[in-house]
Amino acid sequence: MTALGFLYPGHSAEDDYPRVEQLLGSDIRLQVVHTDIGEDAHRVDALVEMGSPARLAAGVEELRLTGAEAVVWACTSGSFVLGWEGAHDQVRGLARAAGLPASSTSFAFAHAVRELGAGRVAVAATYPEDVAGYFAAFLKAAGVDVVSLRSSGVVTAAEVGTWGRDEVLALARAGDHPDAQAVLLPDTALHTAAHLPDLEAALGKPVLTANQVTVWEALRLASRRVNAPALGTLFTKEPLVQAPGA
């Protein structure tokens, strides 16, 4: 069995993880530990505090007890808001605290875009415009060309967590761009695991979503690949392990 650990802030779309685990099949277990979100606000100061070393360290011991082989900070805004170097420092601190390979959702997006060979992307964000701009800057630092950036101005993760299929599809369509080779939906508070085939069918191109890439990143850290087409194009690239029924 491969056990993978995730530090997830608060409670919004964490039910994406058992859904993804079911779609992966095989012998993979996704262990989610909730961290204290502090103030639920897509505001720079609140996001920096949400991803502080103390808040992340508080969840690490519980994850270690699960036997996790790798840990991912399952929060995009609480990592990219620190900037490219700050996000690296955050992950290094998490790895030291956990004694495990570690990453964050922001780096998961950067690595997943590279995996797809998508040099140009569109970003469809739930965040306010200033926070969305930090994500675009992070991607540019990773060598990704952001050809379009759409922000929805939603302030709280709680509100994002209430969005259903129709809202998610509308967000993706509104954020797409003809020049984009992939569309990115960066909020882990957004339920997307059930909608990936619909999203890619609607846009006719790969779609990367936060909880999807977070799980993929943990698998990458554990040197596992799973072919699970229901999780989008990202999970059909050079599979080493076939999911049952896939």
Image (tube, rainbow, N blue to C red):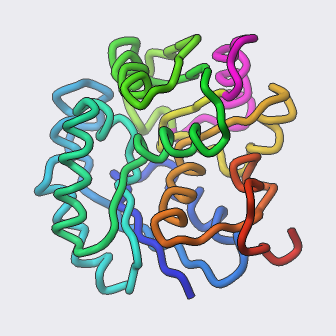
Magenta stretch contains residue 217 = no
Residue 169 is covered by the magenta coloring: yes
Residue 137 point in image, percent of width and height: 37, 20
User: Image check: 113 left or right of 134?
Assistant: right
> Residue 86's quadrant in the figure?
top left
For residue 151, above or below residue 14: above
In magenta, the rendered stretch is 161-182
- Residue extending furthest left? 54
Quarter of the image with the N terminus is bottom right
Q: Which residue is rendered at x = 58% and y = 12% of the image?
A: 147
Q: State the residue at coordinates (76%, 64%).
A: 227
Looking at the image, residue 87 lies above or below residue 104: above
Counting from the top left corner in percent of width and height, residue 105 is at 43, 46
Quarter of the figure with the C terminus? bottom right
Q: Residue at x 80, y 55 (%)?
A: 230
Q: For residue 166, what is the image quadrant?
A: top right
Q: Nearer the viewer, residue 71 or 170?
A: 71
